[in-house]
Image (spheres, rainbow, N blue to C red):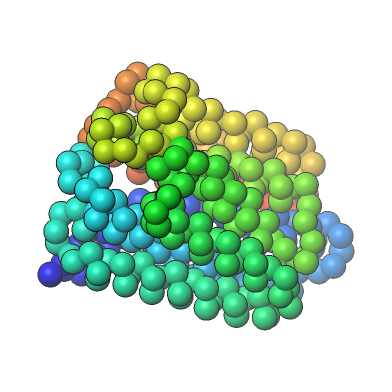
Amino acid sequence: MATLSQWIEGSRPRTWPAAVAPVAAGTGSAVEHLARTGAGVDLGVVLPRALLALGVALALQIGVNFANDYSDGVRGTDDDRVGPFRLTGSRAARPEAVRRAAIGSLAVGGLLGLVLIALAGIWWTLAVGAAAIAAAWFYTGGKRPYGYMGLGEIFVFVFFGLVAVLGTAYAITLTTTWIAVLAACAIGLLAVAVLVTNNLRDIPTDSVTGKHTLAVRLGEARTRVLYAACVLVPFALMVPVAIAHRPAALVLPALALAVAPVRSVLRGAAGRDLIPVLGATGRLELVFSLLLLIGLVIPA
């Protein structure tokens, strides 16, 4: 039976920033819009909705991690891996228990999402929420998991970038702005970089177990270039944001945190050497989003 620490490790804490980051960016975009239009920033509205959005994002992130652990484990994809601990593949937990943890986490995310939708009165987004839960499960679950077809990066960009950032901002302001769109694209690319790091590390095992990720399809060299692009392009996207709202330039110094992981990947880091890159990429995404939040909240 898995211990509590193993369950926590199995939830992949290094990926949690991918849940916090879009909510931070979306909240910052919403506050900037409210202040710029003179609508006023009502913390009684902003904080509860932002916290609910954070709960949704964390629950879905943990749910997709457990679902991935379960599905890859029962398929044998994790039998010979060099990455972080897996509950199913290591036999520390029974597959059924991991499956229940995945379903439970996704259910919590769905429930919190329902509360947020009701609070904001945006019932039409129920379909978006349902799609997000389905995407979390079918990444590696079901008969034709899209993660095995090289589509994982697209879905991560859409749901952990566009949907999460714009959804958070919309739940607060009931509108969408170009700043929120650029923030969503930037966060989405950084979330993709986290996934690309995982898939780059797993190319040797994925290529022989039938898991045709985008990294397997592109090959190692082009995947390394893709990683660098996903990490660096977000900073270019923030330049027009910083021009329009000068305090948002606070996010640009986070580029310093990108130097080490990008250099490591471009110089050929592989296997276990990519585990620190995964952590560094997650930290970069988190710091990027928090600095953007602070920059957008500061009056221009």
Q: Residue at x 17, y 41 (%)?
A: 80
Which one is nearer the viewer's eye here, 221 or 283? 221
Image quadrant in which you'd find residue 46 = bottom right
| Visible residue check, residue 283 | no
Vertical comparison of 245 with 67: above or below: above
Residue 162: x and y, percent? 63, 51
Which one is nearer the viewer's eye here, 266 or 256? 266
Is 41 left, or right, of 139 in this rendering?
right
* Extreme residue toward the right, this view: 38
Residue 69: x and y, percent? 29, 56
Image quadrant in which you'd find residue 130 = bottom right
Residue 85: x and y, percent? 21, 51
Vertical comparison of 67 with 96: above or below: above
| Visible residue check, residue 88 | yes
Residue 151: x and y, percent? 50, 41
Image quadrant in which you'd find residue 67 = bottom left
Q: Residue at x 38, y 36 (%)?
A: 212
Is 193 left, or right, of 250 in this rendering?
left
Vertical comparison of 72 with 57: above or below: above
Q: Residue at x 20, y 41 (%)?
A: 81
Q: Residue at x 76, y 66 (%)?
A: 173
* Quadrant in the picture for the N terminus: bottom left
Which one is nearer the viewer's eye here, 151 or 251? 151
Count of numbered badges drawn on the protein: 0
* Extreme residue toward the front, this view: 143
